[in-house]
Image: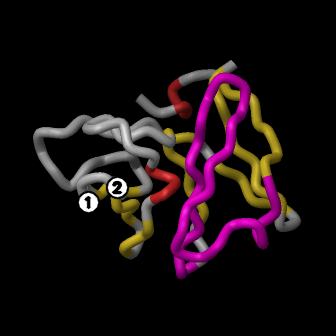
Amino acid sequence: MTALEEAVEYATVCTLDDLPTGLGRAFVIGSHRVAIFRTRTGKVFAVADKCPHKGGPLSDGMLAGEQVVCPMHAFRFDAAGNCDQPSVCAVRTYPVEVEDRLVRVGVPV
């Protein structure tokens, strides 16, 4: 389930310059621990910072294109939350806005 299916409230979490290209950063927004990534093409996306397979911190993973590689077992999750392994459930995603180089993430109200 994505946050787009629910009412969300946006929080400013960092500047675009705070996000290293190709790597993730963890943020806590209310009760949500979120991993935010910036791809080499400039796309910014956010997913839950917990792999649904082994519970690993996805923010410690690297990007392969637009997929987050889990640091615990190398499963890959795309920006839509889908896993490259058919037996693993998707990871929650969060909507992201970037305006005036500020990164805002929407979390459920």
Q: Where residue 85 sits: x, y (%)?
A: 15, 50
- Name the residue rendered at 64%, 73% in the picture: 20
Q: CA distance from mark 2 to mark 1?
A: 5 Å
| Residue at horizontal 69 percent and vertical 18 percent from the top | 109
Dot 1: few (<14), some (14–19), or many (≥20) neighbours within 10 Å? few
| Residue with the mark numbered 1 | 74
Task: Tell me which amino acid carries mark 1.
Answer: Ala
- Looking at the image, the residue that sits furthest to the bottom is 40
Residue stretch rendered in magenta on the structure? 14-41
Q: Is the Cβ of the residue at disc 2 closer than 8 Å to that at disc 1?
A: yes
Which amino acid type corresponds to the residue marked 2 in the rendered image?
Cys
Outermost residue on the right side: it is: 100
Percent of width and height locating residue 23: 54, 68
Q: Position of residue 55 (x, y in %)?
A: 36, 36
Above or below, comparing residue 1 to residue 77 in the picture: above
- In the picture, residue 66 is in which quadrant? bottom left
Check if residue 12 falls in the magenta segment. no
| Dot 1: element | loop
Q: Residue at x 52, y 74 (%)?
A: 22
Residue sticking out furthest to the top: 109
Q: Quadrant of the N terminus?
A: top left
Which residue is under mark 2?
Answer: 70
Q: Secondary structure at mark 2?
A: loop
Please identify the residue farthest to the left as the structure is shown: 87
User: How crowded is the residue under tag 2: few (<14 C-alpha within 10 Å), some, or many (20+)?
Assistant: many
Which residue sits at x=12%, y=45%?
86
